[in-house]
Amino acid sequence: MFPLMLIGMVGSTIPISILGSRFAMSNQPFWSPIHYIPVVGMLCGSSISAIVIAVNYVLKELQENRDKVEMLLAYGASRMEACNPIAREALRLALTPV
């Protein structure tokens, strides 16, 4: 799970930091360390906190509602269909501003 989270975080943080530094802050060159490093730090901090909130919620709910998820799977639901309500609530919690 770590490689997947790392790829997701790097894949979102780097492009957003480049766009923010280049266009929103109008830095020339955009990789100027005095401006770019704090932006990347803020984005990484926000990403890490959102990932932690979402993963904790998903693991807790899957453990508490194991019988419900197993029942949905036994009735023929796919993994995505069985975990969809849990994933939606985890996403809502992770995107709530802290």
Image (spheres, grey):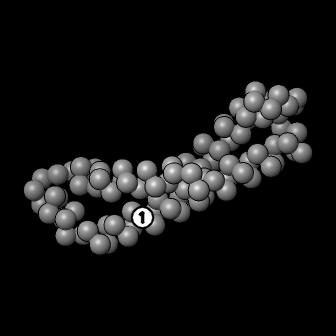
In this rendering, would 89 be left or right of 84? right
Q: Can you say whether 45 is above or below 23 in the image? A: below
Q: Position of residue 28 (x, y in %)?
A: 88, 29
Secondary structure under the numbered disc 1 in the rendered image? helix
The answer to whether residue 3 of the structure is visible from this angle is: no
Mark 1, residue position? 57
Tally of marks: 1
Q: Residue at x 81, y 43 (%)?
A: 36
Q: Amino acid at mark 1?
A: Tyr
| Residue 79, quarter of the rendered image | bottom left
Pick the quarter of the image with the C terminus. Answer: bottom right
Classify mark 1: residues with Cα within 10 Å, few (<14), some (14-19) or many (20+): some
Q: Can you say whether 37 is above or below 62 in the image? A: above
The answer to whether residue 22 of the structure is visible from this angle is: yes
| Residue 65, quarter of the rendered image | bottom left
In this rendering, would 13 be left or right of 76? right
Q: Position of residue 88 (x, y in %)?
A: 36, 50
Q: Can you say whether 11 is above or below 85 in the image? A: above
Q: Position of residue 49 (x, y in %)?
A: 59, 59
Q: Position of residue 19 (x, y in %)?
A: 71, 32
The front one of 85 and 73 is 85
Q: Residue at x 10, y 56 (%)?
A: 75
In this rendering, would 92 be left or right of 3? left
The front one of 5 and 68 is 68
The front one of 12 and 49 is 49
Q: Residue at x 51, y 49 (%)?
A: 95
Q: Residue furthest left?
A: 75
